[in-house]
Image: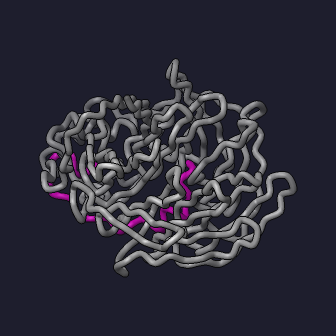
Amino acid sequence: MRINLMNLVGLTCVLAFSQTAVAQRPSPSALPDGPGKALVESICSSCHSTATITRAAGFSSAEQWHDLFSTMIELPAAQANTIATYLAEHFPEDTSRRPNLIAGDVEIEIIEWTVPTLGQRARDPIEAPDGSIWWTGMWASLTGRLDPETGIMEEYRLPATSRPHTIVPDAQGNIWYTGNSNATIGKLDPQTGTVTEYKTQARDPHSATFHPNGNLYFTAQGAGMLGRLNPATGELKEIDTEPRPYGIKAAEDGTLWIAFNGTNKIGAMHPDTMEVKYYEIPNKRTRVRRLDLDSKGMVWFVNSTMGKIGRLDPATGEIKQWDSPSGPSSHPYALAVIDDVVWYNESGMRPDALVRFNPASESFQSWAIPSGAGIVRNVWATEDGNLLIHQSSSNRVGLVKIN
């Protein structure tokens, strides 16, 4: 059923946040005494542990705190002001987490939209064939459509237990999602609003990509599995793999490249046999979340735990890495290659920083993301050479126009 939720406000907590997820929350952290403590404990903890607050980098003003939590929950002015004042007093900005921003000659414009349903943790935006922008609201079990020309948004409810992690469009404009909490791959037909689900063996389908052969390939991080779905027949094949497969991309030669967040490896999977060849990245601490390919078939990746970006030459196995501008704790996360230039974010910084790396000159340039209180977990290169981003914590979807 197609649902327009533009006027929905006041959701104190997304109802689709499952009991399983609640049971896995971190234990609460003690908050400092003061006016507002009780409100924070009762209201903020309805959706997440107070440990989320104590781990935050903080803000320099009550207005910034209010801007953040107003995308999660609608409160009466008196309560909102009390909470914002309390948070600003006891959780000021951690200046050690400011990014090291590098100046340069490239100009960009970042446009951001706050999605309708509060607290949904919008993420993983994509561009559909008609130019519309879609995202997944993981905690609300929904997907949304944005018209970037008008700013009009509408949301589609998915099965309540699905908690979709990633979405990808097919050539017909259908939106496919990974049901991270109900072990499914799902397809939404935007024309009718109908959803078709395919049950997976893997308990937590994670990221997905379409292959030129028409099949959908996906990772399952917790299950340690890789999968292939034939949309025409519904046939599924799944295999065990190295720990915590994460990002996945299809190369022009048909190879599926897999980023591993549980070991220091990158995998190359054959689309037909699903056999995987592994490339080991130096240092056992290395963990790779996302990767992409350039026009020469080079694999670019983020070394999240080491604060680096890297390049793998599949022909020789040679690996070269560069330190990210903000250092070892910068935690590069999402990555895309546009016109052989690498774009990624430093998710460990506050604000979250968008970084451009030019391989030809081996030079960096970076910008603070305006709503950079959260984390960009995935990005998407548009047909006209721009970049889609998001901020999961502050429920925003963004378009980076690259001049």
Q: Which picture quadrant has residue 395?
A: top left
Q: Is residue 400 above or below residue 181?
A: above
Residue 120 is at least partly visible in this image = no
At x 54% / y 50%, what residue is drawn?
Answer: 138
Residue 390 is left or right of residue 187, and the answer is left
Q: Is residue 38 magenta?
A: yes
Left or right: residue 264 versus residue 160 is left
Outermost bottom residue: 284
Whether residue 170 is visible to the viewer of this picture, yes or no, is yes
Quarter of the image containing the C terminus? top left
The picture places residue 31, in percent across and down from the top left corner, at 21, 59
Q: Residue 200, image x and y in percent?
A: 73, 66
What residue lies at 43% left-to-right and 67% top-to-bottom?
288
The residue sitting at 42% across, 37% down in the picture is 396
Residue 247 placed where, x, y %?
53, 60
Q: Is residue 64 left or right of residue 49?
A: left
Q: Is residue 220 left or right of residue 29?
A: right
The residue sitting at 55% across, 66% down in the picture is 258
Nearest to the observer: residue 80 or residue 330:
330
Where residue 393 appears, as percent x and y from the top left, is: 38, 47
User: Observer-nearest residue: 393 or 340?
Assistant: 340
The region drawn magenta spans 15-40
Q: How many marks?
A: 0
